[in-house]
Image: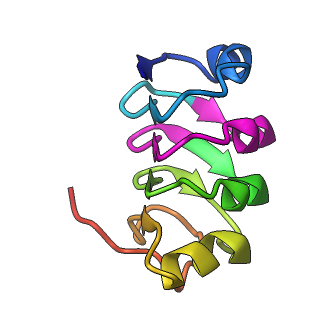
Amino acid sequence: MIFHLISLTEVCCFIYFFALEQLFLGYNNLNGTLPTTLGLLTNLEVLHVEFNQLSGTIPTELGNLKKAQVYTFKNNYFQGIMPRSICLQVEAGILVVHLKEDLSSMICSCCTSVRP
């Protein structure tokens, strides 16, 4: 099941779709922060939020998603340190995280830097 949404408000409404496996929110000019309720999507495997204007920190709740395979956060304005729970999944070879280092002030020792 794949949904393409255009606002974070819509994401909050779709949180009840626990079967959701892929969520593509990239290239939608979204701003604000990622909702912590994304951590309730227990079947989520892929999350793309690249090329928006999102800020704040990456929710630690995303590290609870055991089926996650790819997170793409590049070209946003995230800050802080990537949650350790996410890096543990990366180090275990379960998850790949993309974060472009020259746009974000996010510190991420486990991210893969990807150029557009």
Residue depicted at x 64% and y 48%: 55
Left or right: where 6 falls relative to 75: right
Up/down of 74 relative to 44, above or below: below
Range drawn in magenta = 31-53
Q: Which residue is more in the foreground, 29 or 35?
A: 35
Left or right: where 108 falls relative to 34: left
Q: Quadrant of residue 82?
A: bottom right
Left or right: where 8 falls relative to 91: right
Up/down of 57 relative to 108, above or below: above
Q: Is residue 47 magenta?
A: yes
Q: Which residue is more in the foreground, 12 or 1?
A: 1
Residue 29 in view (yes/no)? yes
Residue depicted at x 51% and y 82%: 92
Furthest-left residue in view?
116
* Residue 6 image offset from top left, x and y in percent: 49, 16
Up/down of 64 relative to 88, above or below: above
Q: Is residue 19 magenta?
A: no
Q: Quadrant of residue 100?
A: bottom left
* Residue 89 image offset from top left, x and y in percent: 57, 73
* Residue 58 image offset from top left, x and y in percent: 68, 56
* Residue 105 image offset from top left, x and y in percent: 58, 69
Residue depicted at x 67% and y 42%: 42
